[in-house]
Amino acid sequence: MSEPRDSLFEAPPMADQERMVEAILFATADPVTVPQLAGRMPHGCDPATALARVRIHYEGRGVTLQRIGDAWAFRTAPDLGFLMQHEVVETRKLSRAAIETLAIVAYHQPATRAEIEEIRGVSVSRGTLDQLIELDWIRLGRRRMSPGRPVTFIVTRHFLDHFGLESARDLPGLKELRAAGLLDSRPPPGTEDEEAEATQDDLFEDDA
Amino acid sequence: MSEPRDSLFEAPPMADQERMVEAILFATADPVTVPQLAGRMPHGCDPATALARVRIHYEGRGVTLQRIGDAWAFRTAPDLGFLMQHEVVETRKLSRAAIETLAIVAYHQPATRAEIEEIRGVSVSRGTLDQLIELDWIRLGRRRMSPGRPVTFIVTRHFLDHFGLESARDLPGLKELRAAGLLDSRPPPGTEDEEAEATQDDLFEDDA
Amino acid sequence: MAQDTYDTADTSVAARIAAEALIVDVGAFEGPLDLLLSLSRTQKVDLRKISILELARQYLAFVEQAKALRLELAADYLVMAAWLAFLKSRLLLPPDPDDEGPSGEELAAHLAFQLERLEAMRNVAARLMARDQLGRDIFARGITEDVTRVRRVTYTATLLDLMQGYARIRTRDDFRPFVMDRENLMTMEQALDRMRHLIGFAGEWTDIVSYLPPEWDHDPVRRRTATAAHFAASLELAKEGKIEIRQGETFSPIHIRKRAPRDV
């Protein structure tokens, strides 16, 4: 603690100096430096000591005294930052491109981007895949052992949970989709159908 | 303490609730109500109890927890105002008419313009009321259920906050004025008794 | 509470100066009630014990002085003067038993009440303004943190969306090209088969278009494929020596007829 610089005026008791630091830091619109504190407190005060005591007093409280450069300010305790946010959740329907991409990954996994594009007949934007990854519905699988070693995409556990599936094998096959009226019910040329069915079951070979 | 409303989620320990109240109130310059606190704290919290504990914790400190109407806010201790010269917001000096009008609204609320004029003995200029409304110290109350259904004026939470009042019942000298009969509505002799009497004390009725 | 608002020290000189000040400052008064309250202070008593009769005399004297000094007095000062003159006469004269209206005492008591109330309001207004005020003596939080509204968008899709999406792709890829194209395509074989049956009846030059089956004649796509198939078929028949073909000029109709049997 510093020597009393001026014997004419008794510096206020440390408890009061602590209160002063507390009030100044609370009310000031910017972080405050020790010299600034000294300039505002009565002569003979020891702001550095008072500051240290305030800091200890607020340890573990909802607000804590934080150093910002050479200045000090009260800040919300880091673990309570969530109280300063009011979350508004907005639910939107997934775009058609995203649904189709997701469906292709689900039915054909592991699927490369080129394969997805081939099946959809249009190019797949990076954003669509990113969105599905962000939603934690698809993730990167093993690289394909073909030229260029392209990455593959597969569906996640979270995807299965969301769609209420035990495994991707539970996804209905084309025949079932057709039976459910989801596919054109016109009898297609048989071979084409078999072929589609066959490729689709690659991954699910142990499917009955 | 209230019954746990939801057994699915355990409310955080009271020490944590105290920290949350502290953080929320520190983050804003405006008073916060108990329902607002409850809305931001996790489910099952008891902000009223937490507030009471925070208030005790801050007793005698440089900042204290103040009740303002139905809301709460941290404010610097009144004896430390001298430290905050930098923070003083220069306000336009109010005219005598404005100050008296404010006092009449505060002590007689809800007060009609005619009542203010009757007490002051002069007409109240539109500008005076506008100025007080602009300062957010008075606002329109319910219309008086008397002929012409005149609008009434009442003081705001901001008025209480500005003058450090917990409620309008804490206005200085209110009890003495009431005891002396100076807040009674006394029509001039010879005029018909109006129903003004009944509505006069609306806002103070739960006063001891 | 009124007695502490003015000083006890007073002399007749001070009273005279005060009276003169009143005249000079008439514009500073907020109406007759304000003036009356100022005049009442010279009586140095509790407002509850004030002599309204004396106050009325003071006010009327003030108005007389103001007139003598040719000061412009607002109408309400004169109205008050008239009313106080009436009150004064009521207070001085014995009550008239036939008078229905309020007594002089009642009117005086009400005026005393009004003065006391105005005084009380001024006192509490002063006390209110003397309180610690926010932003002057008491301060709010300087660094505020706004509650940020975080907009989190979640996307949903149902299993049905997923299956419909897949079905949509599959329908497009697998079935459309085959089913639709077969329906709208006539092969040369079909046309040849048809023409072999019909050619036996075509002794005269006939436009090839008239050989098209009626169900292929309307839709442009079907008409085109049928025309092409029939033309190809007619070339095949000509090669076989079954028919003759002629066309007058480029883009004009193509005619065919059964080739007349020659002597073998």
Image: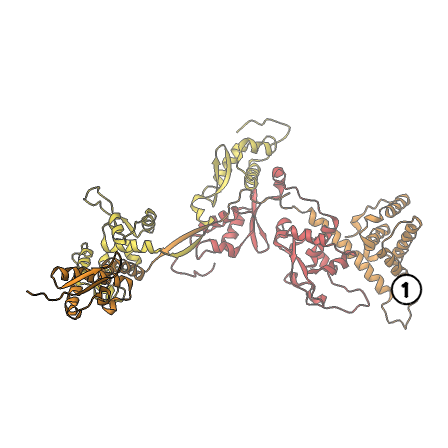
Chain colours: A yellow, B red, C orange
* For residue C71, above or below residue C213: above
- Residue corresponding to mark 1: C90
Residue B140 position by quadrant: bottom right
In the displayed structure, does residue A132 sit left or right of residue C196?
A: right
Q: Is residue A158 visible to the viewer in this orientation of the structure?
A: no
In the displayed structure, does residue C31 sit left or right of residue A141?
A: right
Q: How many marks?
A: 1
Under circle 1, the secondary element is helix
Q: Is residue C16 visible to the viewer in this orientation of the structure?
A: yes
Q: Chain of mark 1?
A: C
Residue depicted at 26% across the width and 65% down the height:
A184
Quadrant position of the C terminus of chain A in the picture? bottom left
In the displayed structure, does residue B54 sit left or right of residue C48?
A: left
Viewer-side residue, A202 vs A117: A117
Q: Residue furthest bottom?
A: C98
Residue depicted at 28% across the width and 66% down the height:
C218
Q: Residue C154: horizontal and vertical position, in percent?
A: 38, 54
Q: Residue C118: horizontal and vertical position, in percent?
A: 77, 55
Q: Residue C89: horizontal and vertical position, in percent?
A: 92, 62
Crowd band around label 1 with a 10 angstrom C-alpha radius: few (<14), some (14–19), many (20+): some
Q: Residue C208: horizontal and vertical position, in percent?
A: 22, 64
Q: Residue furthest front?
A: C263
* For residue B125, above or below residue A189: above
Looking at numbered disc 1 in the image, what kind of residue is underneath it?
A: Arg
